[in-house]
Amino acid sequence: MFKNSGAWLAYVVATFFYSGVWLGEILRWFQRRFGFKKQFARDVSGGTVGSVAAWSIFIIPIWDVYTLGIVTVLVAVVGTLSIPIAVQYMNHVVLPAEGGEKSFGHDGTERRFDFRRITIDEVLAIVLLVWCVHLSEMEWWGTMFWPLLASLVLFRVFDITKWPPQIIKRADAYFEDRGGFWEAFGVMLDDILAAVFAWIAIRIIDALISFIC
């Protein structure tokens, strides 16, 4: 059922061309090399590779406002549809090939949708923030680079900390219990909300810079 090109393609999309897989390898190396606790490394670094990869692509000046808008919608739709298929493919094909026990969590259940290899949700948040910077034509000290860099950094802060928890964590938990498409939607919504709060912070910083300068 899962050994077909369509399921594999969904896995490629959901991991943003294996950037989430590279993340796992990087984390394992850091954990072995520096003795980081697994929980700490996962919480701090989860999704960072996908975020940086997307940011590096979409800050290239070949993108205009209209193209970024189209890409944002496409990533949202295709990403949400690909996640359920990708998770099933990962659990039944990819992880068993790496070692059967790895396809299940510590409680014996299959890994959930927000597994660390899935990074398309971070990609959506980054594209959305880059689009917002272009729409507002925001520049700090004569260049758009600084607000774009702030978008990446602040998004990672809000995504890692899940702050404010009353909003992000509750939204994530609400859709997580529904399964299927809705759980995939919740995975994407979690990062969209983090991007929204990052954008609010960026607008505040922009106002302060304008006031001071």
Image: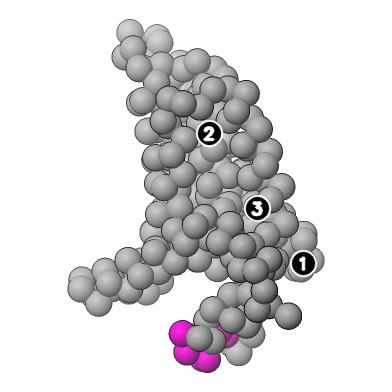
Whether the residues at callouts 3 and 2 have beta carbons within 8 Å, the answer is no
Report how far apart the C-alphas of labels 1 and 2 lie in the structure: 27 Å
Question: SS class of the residue under badge 1?
Answer: helix
Residue depicted at 52% across the width and 81% down the height:
95
The image shows residue 169 at horizontal and vertical percentages of: 62, 56
Q: What residue type is labelled 2?
A: Leu
Relative depth, front residue between 188 and 36: 188
Instruction: Find disc 3 in the rendering and name its residue.
Output: 79
The residue that disc 2 covers is 129
Residue sitting nearer the eye, 1 or 120? 1
Under mark 1, the amino acid is Gly
Q: Which of 147 and 4 is in front in this view?
A: 4
Mark 3 and 1 residues: CB-CB less than 8 Å, in contact? no
- Residue at horizontal 72%, vertical 62%? 183
Q: What stretch is highlighted in magenta?
A: 98-104
Earlier sequence position, callout 3 versus callout 1: 3
**Amino acid type shown at disc 3:** Gly
Marker disc for residue 180: 1
